Image: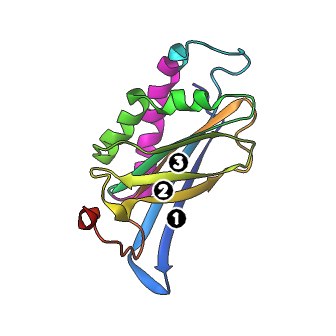
Amino acid sequence: MRVRKIVTIVEEIRSEGGREVFPTARVAVVAAVIPNPWAGQGFVEDLQPGIDAHASDLGALLAPQVMAALDAPAEAYGKAAIVGLSGEVEHGSALIHTLKFGDHFRKAANATTLLPAVEKRGPAGVVFDVPLKHVTDATIRSHHQTVEVRIADAPHPDEIVVALAAAAQGRPQQRLASLSTEQ
């Protein structure tokens, strides 16, 4: 697997709603820009050989890096695949919607819940939001959040951006009642 570049973004939110956030809210994203394994092949009926060749390696590469960038236990997590204009959304989905990819992150984050995702096709510099949910209980509303990402020169038409995101906490200053209050 060739990787053109890795981009790491760490966001620290110190104030929200006019009030100090303590401890500081921390979110990390690590994205790999890779060649689309199916580029230039026309419609590929069987994506499995490309999945087998790349998905696990991508998960193994990105999971430890996003955890190191977060520098704290993950409480929320998510993933993304942004496909260049010459590819199909299904190409990105094929890489990230497999246990071969996601289980690396689940293990690193001590997570048990479904890993939320976004996938779309777009030009270099397209903005995308990575959805985050709690790592062990998807009903915990405080951890439903997104992190916005943009990589100025990616994806090229024949590339895919694959990203993992993690948060060390829920939304800063969250005040919503537990889901159980509505049931």
The residue lying toward the viewer, choosing from 27 and 176, is 176
**95 lies left or right of 76:** right
- Residue 77, given in percent of the width and then of the height, sits at 41, 51
Q: Is residue 53 magenta?
A: yes
Q: Is residue 169 visible?
A: no
Q: Secondary structure at mark 3?
A: strand
- The residue under the point 75% across, 29% down is 86
Report crowding for label 2: few under 14, some 14 to 19, many 20 or more residues within 10 A (C-alpha). Answer: many
**117 lies left or right of 136:** right
**99 lies left or right of 2:** left
Q: Is residue 37 above or below residue 67?
A: above
Q: Separation of disc 3 and disc 2 at Cα?
A: 7 Å
Q: What amino acid type is highlighted by mark number 3?
A: Val
Q: Which residues are magenta?
A: 51-72
Q: What amino acid type is highlighted by mark number 1?
A: Glu
Q: What amino acid type is highlighted by mark number 2?
A: Ala
Residue 11: mark in rendering: 1
